[in-house]
Image (tube, coloured by chain):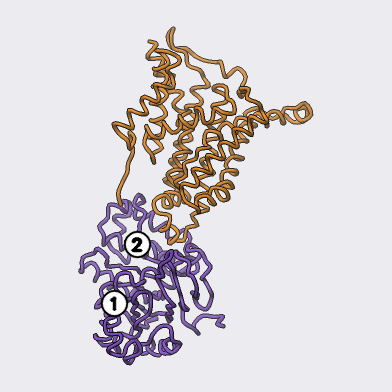
Chain colours: A orange, B purple
């Protein structure tokens, strides 16, 4: 029964990993940017949410207007989307104009700046986003399996976001333009498409989803300034590689498999949790380097 | 100079020089394209034909020289802005979006189109088979079918000047002929065509005016009817340039760098058969 429990918990946390991974996958798929600051952005979203709560729930403001905690958190996502658009159009576009390798250096630098900035302003202490009793509310199946409402909610949000993203990419005008630019940037220009603007929109989506992932992570567990690269970026990469680039459902599958592997590893020994995920990651790289669901096509 | 349409040439290239790194790909090439013409660029591999078209489309920045559309300088515009201005390139190798369907490829072309006669339905009329296969991915089409979709994607942008780069590359002769047979219908809709063609006899057949490049320079320019096979051969290979008195020799020819060549241009264009619109 403890194995069933491990698998269920793994599936639940897998949604969170997929949420982290989809923005990373999108930015690589569309503009060939490997965003090494991706994990740090999630952490920034967590601190940003803390800041918003601190401001909107000071006595002076909350005595006039009551801002629900959820609303404060939700504000982070559109703000991040706008920031994503601006960062892409300025910093990342300037880096892209100088070559793909430059983007790697720039995002690495961004990661260092973010981590040190956070440590400077917020210290190295851990924080989490409080959501009242929801964090501990749960229901049981039998005597050995306990499922937290929060975990189920996060998985549901992740699946909903991926569904929405899938629909956007396949059915909307900008989704079509994003796929066209990802296929052939120059041909898109020749069809009248301003690819820089399309890149900006893709980055806005990536930043928005990573902010959402950061919020979910902050509710799920504790975060500190360095956990972005120590864990989150790594897990996102692993989920993308296991699932296969370019497929949102592959990303979800990759996230869930990673989560299950980690939980099973943790059953042996709590210290083996991350190791088990990495073993699966290496196994996939050896056996099926294109990922489980990759649908590479040739022109 | 010109403010309105009609008075000057529709597309004018003035003394264009383009470098690929250290290599000079085009040297002082000039070109004048009246509305309704079919202008064919010929020349050996590496002569600079594709570079010229890609520079007109905005994909290469010229070192010097300028490109004017209907009297307006477009040299500084990005490729996507030139599309909305009316210059649309069908690139070498088709360059469809392979993971998008036929319909989506056309939609991307029409998303930022100028207003005009061409619509996606119009393209489906032009290519009878296409509507039935609109939901297929472009990667699944044959080369000729892909070329048709590439032309359709350019047409729905309603170009004033359509640049066609090596339409026949990798296609069976019968397919090539079928595509070239469409040219009169394109001209009838008011499109002016500048094309690059490896097959010289094909170019002579469809063009109202041909322009030969050799190592980035103009070696011959004129209406097909006024040029002899020897002149074209000499200009194409550059073999008899000294011996036969070319580049200045012959009735319709002129070397690109002399102002006299441009003066000959409009006269020849008016005398030829291709000016449909």
> Local crowd at mark 1 within 10 Å, few (<14), some, or many (≥20)?
many
Badge 2 marks a residue whose secondary structure is helix
Most extreme residue toward the top is A143
On screen, A80 above or below B143? above
* Residue A225 coordinates in the image, percent (x, y): 59, 28
Question: Compared to A133, does B232 lie above or below?
Answer: below
Identify the residue shown where x is 37% and y is 28%: A281
Judge whether B205 appears above or below B84 on screen.
below
Residue A151 on image: x %, y %: 50, 22
Looking at the image, is mark 2 or mark 1 earlier in the sequence? 2
Q: Name the residue tied to disc 2.
A: B150
Task: State the quadrant of the N terminus of chain B.
Answer: bottom right
Image quadrant in which you'd find residue A250? top left
Quarter of the image that includes the C terminus of chain B: bottom left
Kindly identify which numbered label has been placed on residue A238. none
Q: What's the residue at 28%, 72% (across, down)?
A: B198
Side (left or right) of B113 relative to A57: left
Q: Which residue is mark 1?
A: B203
Which structural element holds mark 1?
A: helix
Provide residue A41's location: percent of width, then percent of height.
Answer: 56, 35
Q: Quick one: label 2, few (<14), some, or many (20+) residues within 10 Å?
A: many
Q: Position of residue B190 (x, y in %)?
A: 41, 76
User: What residue is at 32 percent from the left and 51 percent from the top?
Assistant: B137
């Amino acid at each position: 029964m403890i194995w069933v429990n491990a698998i269920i918990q793994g599936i639940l946390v897998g949604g969170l990993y997929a949420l982290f991974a989809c923005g990373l996958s999108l930015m690589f798929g569309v503009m060939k940017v490997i965003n090494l600051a991706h994990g740090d952005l999630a952490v920034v979203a967590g601190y940003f949410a803390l800041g918003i709560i601190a401001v909107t729930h000071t006595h002076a403001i909350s005595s006039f207007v009551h801002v629900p905690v959820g609303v404060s958190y939700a504000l982070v996502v559109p703000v991040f989307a706008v920031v994503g658009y601006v960062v892409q159009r300025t910093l990342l576009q300037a880096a892209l104009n100088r070559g793909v390798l430059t983007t790697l250096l720039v995002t690495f630098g961004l990661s260092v700046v973010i981590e040190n900035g956070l440590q400077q302003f917020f210290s190295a202490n851990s924080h989490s986003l409080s959501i009242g009793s929801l964090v501990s509310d749960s229901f049981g199946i039998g005597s050995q399996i306990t499922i937290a409402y929060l975990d189920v909610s996060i998985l549901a949000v992740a699946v909903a976001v991926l569904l929405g993203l899938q629909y956007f990419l396949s059915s909307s005008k900008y989704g079509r333009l994003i796929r066209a630019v990802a296929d052939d940037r120059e041909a898109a220009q020749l069809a009248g498409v301003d690819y820089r603007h399309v890149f900006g929109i893709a980055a806005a989506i990536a930043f928005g989803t990573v902010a959402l992932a950061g919020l979910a992570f902050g509710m799920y567990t504790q975060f500190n300034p360095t956990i972005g690269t120590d864990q989150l970026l790594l897990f996102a990469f692993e989920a993308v590689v296991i699932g296969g680039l370019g497929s949102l459902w592959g990303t979800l599958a990759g996230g869930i498999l990673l989560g299950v592997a980690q939980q099973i590893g943790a059953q042996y020994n709590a210290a083996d949790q991350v190791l088990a995920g990495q073993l699966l990651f290496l196994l996939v790289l050896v056996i099926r380097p294109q990922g489980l669901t990759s649908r590479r096509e040739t022109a | 100079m010109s403010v309105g349409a009609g008075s000057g040439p529709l597309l004018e290239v003035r003394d264009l020089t383009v470098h690929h790194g250290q290599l000079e790909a085009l040297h002082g090439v000039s070109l004048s394209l009246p509305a309704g013409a079919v202008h064919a660029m010929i020349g050996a591999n590496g002569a600079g034909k594709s570079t010229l078209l890609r520079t007109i489309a905005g994909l290469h920045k010229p070192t010097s020289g300028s490109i004017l559309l209907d009297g307006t300088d477009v040299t500084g515009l990005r490729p996507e802005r030139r599309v909305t201005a009316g210059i649309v390139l069908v690139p070498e190798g088709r360059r469809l979006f392979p993971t998008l369907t036929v319909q989506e490829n056309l939609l991307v072309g029409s998303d930022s189109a100028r207003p005009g006669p061409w619509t996606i339905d119009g393209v489906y009329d032009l290519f009878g088979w296409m509507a039935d296969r609109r939901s297929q991915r472009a990667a699944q089409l044959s080369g000729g079918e892909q070329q048709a979709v590439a032309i359709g994607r350019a047409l729905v942008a309603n170009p004033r000047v359509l640049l066609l780069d090596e339409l026949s590359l990798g296609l069976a002769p019968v397919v090539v002929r079928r595509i070239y047979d469409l040219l009169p219908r394109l001209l009838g809709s008011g499109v002016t065509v500048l094309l690059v063609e490896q097959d010289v006899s094909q170019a002579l057949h469809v063009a109202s005016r041909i322009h030969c490049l050799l190592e980035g320079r103009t070696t011959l320019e004129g209406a097909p009817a006024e040029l002899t096979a020897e002149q074209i051969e000499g200009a194409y290979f550059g073999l008899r340039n000294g011996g036969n008195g070319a580049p200045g020799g012959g009735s319709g020819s002129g070397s690109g760098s002399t102002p006299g060549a441009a003066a000959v241009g409009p006269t020849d264009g008016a005398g030829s058969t291709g000016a449909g619109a």
